[in-house]
Image: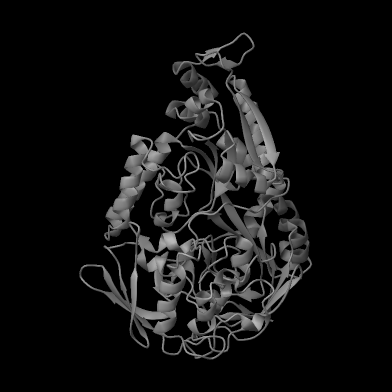
């Protein structure tokens, strides 16, 4: 379960903007790099072995910000999901070691030969925080009256449909639920990992149409009724969240001890990452998401302060530059013509010094990418299959000249109509890595005759321009990843609202986008895992060829953990068997 320690639930949400802001980054000296090899531990999920622990103790952690809501259906940002993720369960959950679904509220299931009828058997010992049993009525209520309710906006609604058609959910008996789906649907078991909610608590709010404002952040914690391993005991805005173990939680270790082992969590709300670092070093928190710039300070202190730094490898998150290809955008038509030209985007990709960016902006802790697949997706990652665009300014300029640009006396390139090759590149202010990348790109593109007006702007302003009024030319932005590509359809399908370069298309604007749509639709209903992976790989190969996003890097994830915590097996998708983490005194 990846609910306790992760500050965002990657596999539940489709693709979300990376909101975390970072501080300046600088290179580690050679001597510090030698120390780093001894202190930083690489994680190998195949070597995880869980030992029997002991109950008790308080975990101290930090939250990056206040929740906007306690309602899991309405939560759209990581600050909310980080606070409430431990309170709820779905029918299934993801095993972060195998990346496959496993039982959660449903202890077992079966499907018929057609793959369109599924039967889920609920745990008979599962209870809500108020002691009432979890029943099939809760599941039917959650799906039919909440997720499929036209009056309740929910990102889960897109996930819980097949070709636009919803699942038919019916009660068979008190602990058995039937799902009928329009056709075989490969990621079905991942899709039903959405939180199940209590009918006896929320039915009235749904009926009187106040559900969307139910469980706001001023709701007394005792009113929040879930099934998760912890319940919220106290929440003080801007200060802390206090959790205690759910006495009704069903899971136990092989010796019959209750899980999770840790009985309390104290989470301080600390927006400033520098303060979070200090809190970890001084022992006020037990683990900390490490920035590359923290290593010179953390590495020498690891032995003295008794902690380990884990390198979890490349994340599923991707960072890229995207050019606006939207015909409805209020940008000059000649620029739209440039941005819609595949060779133009390929030329820009050749002008991106990924290795230099990784060394300067990420202290060497990132992975170069040329499509949307990173090493975190072990099923789809294939370094030799996807096209690459090695850093080569000469080749980049040659490509631009081959599509009609000419070099002027001032050294800049001009199109056939005499327009100077220039554009405005934006990113969110305060994100020093992206600001560094923007300046690197500006300097390198200037070398081949492109003038870039680089601006860092307020994040909310950036999102408005990117998603609402489309008043932008190019942007450096990032997306988090999902375990299954299906949950990224709102990005990769031409009709998707996060299809950033040209969103919400009524029909595909290009042949290649139509082909990607077709491959994604075939993959969604292909039940053979190997065939399904081949379909997705072909789609991402096309995306890599077309470079609608000029893909740059997948950052590596680092985590510092106090050695008093045992059974610690972190991955970029969450912590494996985190209920088994215990505190050794």
Residue at x-position 46% and y-position 85%: 134
Question: Which residue is at 55% across, 26% downward?
Answer: 332
Seen as rendered, the residue at the extreme left is: 113
What is the tally of numbered marks visible in this picture? 0
Residue displayed at 35% across by 47% down? 537
Outermost residue toward the front in this view:
208
User: In the displayed structure, would residue 8 be above or below residue 348?
Assistant: below
- Which coloring applies here? one colour
Tell me if residue 107 can be seen: yes
Residue 59 pos. (x, y %): 67, 76
Q: Is residue 239 above or below residue 471?
A: below
Residue 275, picture quadrant: bottom right
Q: State which quadrant residue 319 falls in.
A: top right
Residue 441 x %, y %: 62, 31
The foreground one among 251 and 365 is 251
Q: Nearer the viewer, residue 32 or 245?
A: 245
Picture coordinates of residue 393 (x, y %)?
54, 24
Q: In which quadrant is the C terminus drawn?
A: bottom right
Q: Nearer the viewer, residue 18 or 261?
A: 18
Name the quadrant containing residue 91.
bottom left
Is any atom of residue 263 visible in this view?
Answer: no
In the displayed structure image, the side of residue 355 where residue 516 appears, left or right? left
Q: Position of residue 156 (x, y in %)?
A: 46, 63
Q: Name the residue: 60% across, 60% down.
A: 77
* Along the viewing direction, whichever of 157 and 7 lies nearer the viewer: 157
């Amino acid at each position: 379960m990846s609910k306790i320690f992760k500050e965002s639930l990657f596999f539940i949400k489709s693709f979300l903007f990376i909101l975390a802001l970072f501080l300046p980054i600088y290179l580690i000296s050679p001597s510090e790099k030698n120390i780093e090899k001894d202190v930083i531990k690489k994680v190998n999920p195949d070597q995880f072995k869980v030992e029997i622990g002991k109950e008790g103790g308080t975990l101290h952690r930090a939250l990056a910000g206040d929740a906007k809501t306690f309602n899991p259906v309405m939560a759209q940002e990581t600050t909310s999901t980080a606070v409430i993720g431990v309170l709820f369960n779905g029918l299934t959950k993801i095993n972060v070691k195998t990346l496959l679904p496993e039982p959660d509220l449903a202890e077992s299931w079966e499907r018929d030969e057609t793959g369109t009828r599924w039967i889920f058997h609920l745990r008979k010992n599962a209870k809500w925080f108020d002691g009432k049993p979890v029943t099939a009525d809760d599941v039917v209520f959650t799906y039919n009256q909440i997720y499929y309710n036209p009056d309740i906006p929910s990102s889960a609604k897109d996930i819980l449909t097949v070709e636009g058609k919803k699942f038919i959910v019916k009660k068979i008996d008190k602990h058995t639920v039937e799902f009928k789906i329009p056709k075989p649907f490969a990621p079905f078991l991942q899709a039903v990992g959405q939180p199940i909610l209590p009918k006896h608590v929320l039915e009235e709010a749904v009926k009187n149409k106040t559900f969307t404002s139910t469980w706001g952040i001023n709701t007394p914690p005792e009113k929040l009724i879930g099934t998760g391993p912890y319940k919220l005991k106290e929440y003080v805005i801007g200060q802390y969240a206090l959790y205690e173990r759910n006495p009704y939680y069903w899971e136990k270790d092989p010796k019959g001890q209750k899980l999770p082992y840790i009985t309390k969590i104290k989470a301080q709300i600390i927006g400033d990452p520098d303060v979070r670092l200090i809190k970890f070093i001084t022992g006020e928190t037990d683990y900390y998401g490490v920035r590359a710039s923290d290593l010179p300070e953390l590495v020498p202190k690891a032995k003295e302060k008794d902690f380990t730094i884990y390198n979890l490898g490349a994340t599923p998150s991707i960072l890229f530059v995207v050019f606006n290809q939207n015909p409805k955008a209020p940008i000059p038509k000649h620029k739209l013509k440039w941005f819609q030209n595949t060779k133009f985007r390929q030329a820009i990709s050749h002008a991106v010094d990924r290795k230099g960016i990784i060394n300067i902006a990420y202290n060497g802790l990132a992975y170069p990418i040329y499509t949307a697949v990173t090493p975190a997706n072990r099923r789809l990652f294939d370094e030799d299959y996807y096209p690459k665009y090695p850093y080569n300014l000469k080749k980049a300029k040659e490509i631009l000249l081959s599509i009609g640009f000419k070099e002027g006396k001032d050294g800049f390139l001009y199109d056939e109509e005499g327009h100077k090759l220039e554009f405005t590149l934006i990113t969110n202010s305060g994100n020093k890595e992206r600001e560094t990348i923007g300046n690197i790109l500006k300097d390198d593109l200037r070398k081949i005759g492109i003038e870039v007006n680089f601006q860092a702007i307020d994040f909310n302003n950036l999102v408005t321009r990117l998603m609402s009024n489309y008043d932008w030319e190019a942007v450096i932005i990032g997306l988090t990843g999902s375990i299954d590509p299906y949950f990224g359809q709102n990005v990769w399908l031409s009709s998707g609202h996060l299809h950033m370069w040209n969103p919400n298309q009524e029909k595909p604007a290009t042949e290649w986008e139509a082909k990607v749509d077709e491959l994604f639709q075939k993959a969604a209903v292909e039940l053979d895992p190997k065939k399904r992976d081949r379909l997705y790989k072909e789609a991402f190969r096309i995306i890599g060829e077309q470079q609608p996003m000029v893909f740059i890097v997948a950052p590596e994830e680092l985590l510092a953990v106090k050695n008093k915590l045992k059974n610690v097996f972190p991955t970029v998708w969450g912590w494996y068997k985190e209920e088994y983490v215990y505190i050794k005194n």
